[in-house]
Amino acid sequence: MVRAAEELDRQFGVRVVSLEREFITAMREESTGAKVRWDIVLRADAAVRDSRDRQNLRNLVQRALPRVAAAIPRTAPPALLTCPGLLSRYGQWPWLTDLAQTTGRADGIHGAWLLVPWEDPTVPPALGDEAVPLLPSQRAHIPDLWLANRHRAA
């Protein structure tokens, strides 16, 4: 994944944004503002899905999303969004879909690519048990030969 991000940056000059880093930073800021200790947030993350702690965590995630969105560049070049595992973990694929629909609008992002691990291009990409919500026309597999720059060999 690191090699893919580096090569995409080298080839296209994208702005790399780690969704995991931005999510954790935003959640920490929100928890600090709400006077909730981080160890309590971590305990809620490990809690049973239907528990009150997990519901409180979902509320914290919702409050953090605008900060995550603000970290995504609004001007060219496009953003390369990496490390999207927390989107899947916290059920936030609809947020990403909504964000993608702002592309090109005055109040939206310039553009973004989502980088996910994807070994078998005959099967839609997934994180854990959850499919990444992309149409076939919205995804491209990056072969190892391209990453190794073999496509430029003469």
Image (spheres, rainbow, N blue to C red):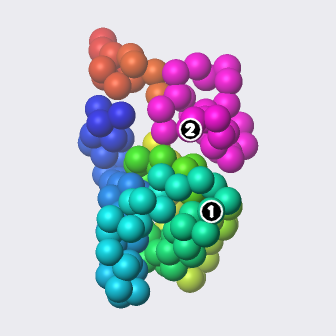
**Does 5 appear above or below 122?**
below
- Which mark, by number, is residue 127? 2
Which contiguous range is marked in magenta? Answer: 116-141
Q: Residue at x 41, y 66 (%)?
A: 41
Packing grade of label 2 (10 A; few <14, some 14-19, many >=20) is some
Pair 1/2: label in front: 1
Q: Image quadrant for the C terminus?
A: top left
Q: Residue at x 33, y 41 (%)?
A: 5
Residue holding disc 1: 51
**Does 151 appear above or below 39?**
above
Q: Image quadrant for the N terminus?
A: top left
> Toward which corner of the image does residue 58 lie, by quadrant?
bottom right
Expressed as whole percent of the image width and height from the top left, the position of residue 95 reads 62, 65
Left-right relation of 87 to 29:
right
> Looking at numbered disc 1 in the image, what kind of residue is underneath it?
Ser
Expressed as whole percent of the image width and height from the top left, the position of residue 70 reads 43, 76
> Toward which corner of the image does residue 20 lie, by quadrant?
bottom left
SS at mark 1 in the image: loop
If you read the primary sequence from the N terminus, does the residue marked by circle 1 or circle 2 appear first? Answer: 1
The foreground one among 130 and 122 is: 130
Expressed as whole percent of the image width and height from the top left, the position of residue 62 reads 56, 74
